[in-house]
Image (cartoon, rainbow, N blue to C red):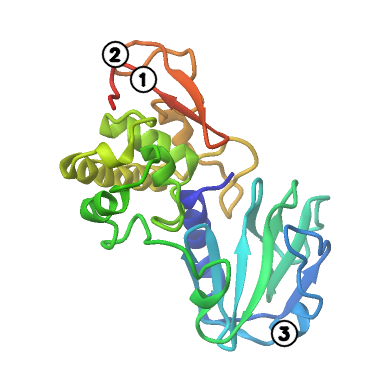
Amino acid sequence: MPELPEVEITRRGIEPHLARRTITGVVVRHRGLRWPVPRNLGAILKGAEIRAVGRRAKYLLFDCGKGTLIVHLGMSGSLRVVPAAEAPGPYDHFDLGVGAVSVRLRDPRRFGAVLWHRGDDPARHPLLAHLGVEPLSGAFTGRVLHAASRGRRVAIKQLLMDHRLVAGIGNIYANESLFRAGIDPRAAGRRLSLARCERLVAEVRATLEDALAAGGSSLRDFVQSDGSPGYFQQHYFVYDRAGEPCRVCGAAIRRVVQGQRASFYCRRCQRG
């Protein structure tokens, strides 16, 4: 699914087309996404000015002054900037029109979301209220991770993916960050020293920044707002490489399941 880098890349791609623009039309072709699209969304949004396009974890936030349009790309979604007159495809469920162009949600599996939050503080929305710190922000530090892991009987990878602690890292980038930090994903978080937590936080940040520079990962349906793919998948060290040789030491990459998610690691390069 699109993870934090892909959502941030989408935000950067669509904001120049939307910021300080007036919404001229809304088209909802299928209300049955993960949560039903509000029936009166068109009436709410038409004529509103989009002040800015922000992001919180994997949620896109369209600041419309009187409220916030919240969009999640789900498992397979993407937002593309297209000519308003372009005919929709079978999986194009929602258009946000601003004059001659539209931002179009394509979501084959319909696990995405298009929601409305009334008021000036989207952080109070139930989907956002309990999210932890942003992994690219200065609030995410080794000391924060170290303190959060004390006394908890959970593996470090599952801790990284706990959105109540740190919001939006996702499975791909948790795997890659742990490899770069030399930490086995099965290692107990409470046993990591402060120094190792600091290194891991630095590698999380570096991994996400590298993914942003590469345009994100295009594994299934994700494309950028102009339709072009990302290329970070070409640089994976471990994710989805079970049985293949480690790019560093040559040992076979192994796969285990943690919390119903696949984890990939090198037994030589990563330790508990």
> Picture coordinates of residue 156 (x, y %)?
36, 39
Q: Nearer the viewer, mark 3 or mark 1?
A: 1
Label 1 element class: loop
Q: Nearer the viewer, residue 199 or 9?
A: 199
Label 3 element class: helix
Mark 3 vs mark 2, CA separation in Å: 57 Å
Q: Residue at x 37, y 61 (%)?
A: 133
For residue 76, side relative to residue 30 (left or right): left
Q: Point out which mark residue 57 bears.
A: none
Q: Is residue 103 visible?
A: no
Task: Please tell me how crowded label 2 is: few (under 14), some (14-19), or many (20+) other residues with Cα within 10 Å.
Answer: few
Looking at the rendered structure, the kind of residue marked 1 is: Cys
| Above or below: residue 163 compared with residue 128 | above
Q: Which residue is mark 2?
A: 249
Circles 3 and 2: CB atoms closer than 8 Å: no
Circles 1 and 2: CB atoms closer than 8 Å: yes
Mark 3 vs mark 1, CA separation in Å: 51 Å
Give whichever of discs 3 and 2 has the lower sequence position.
Answer: 3
| Above or below: residue 13 compared with residue 249 | below
Circles 3 and 1: CB atoms closer than 8 Å: no
Q: Point out which mark residue 44 bears.
A: 3
Looking at the rendered structure, the kind of residue marked 3 is: Ile
Place residue 176 in its image quadrant: top left
Mark 1 vs mark 2, CA separation in Å: 9 Å
Give whichever of discs 3 and 1 has the lower sequence position.
Answer: 3
Q: Which residue is mark 1?
A: 266
Q: Residue at x 29, y 31 (%)?
A: 183
For residue 98, side relative to residue 119 (left or right): right
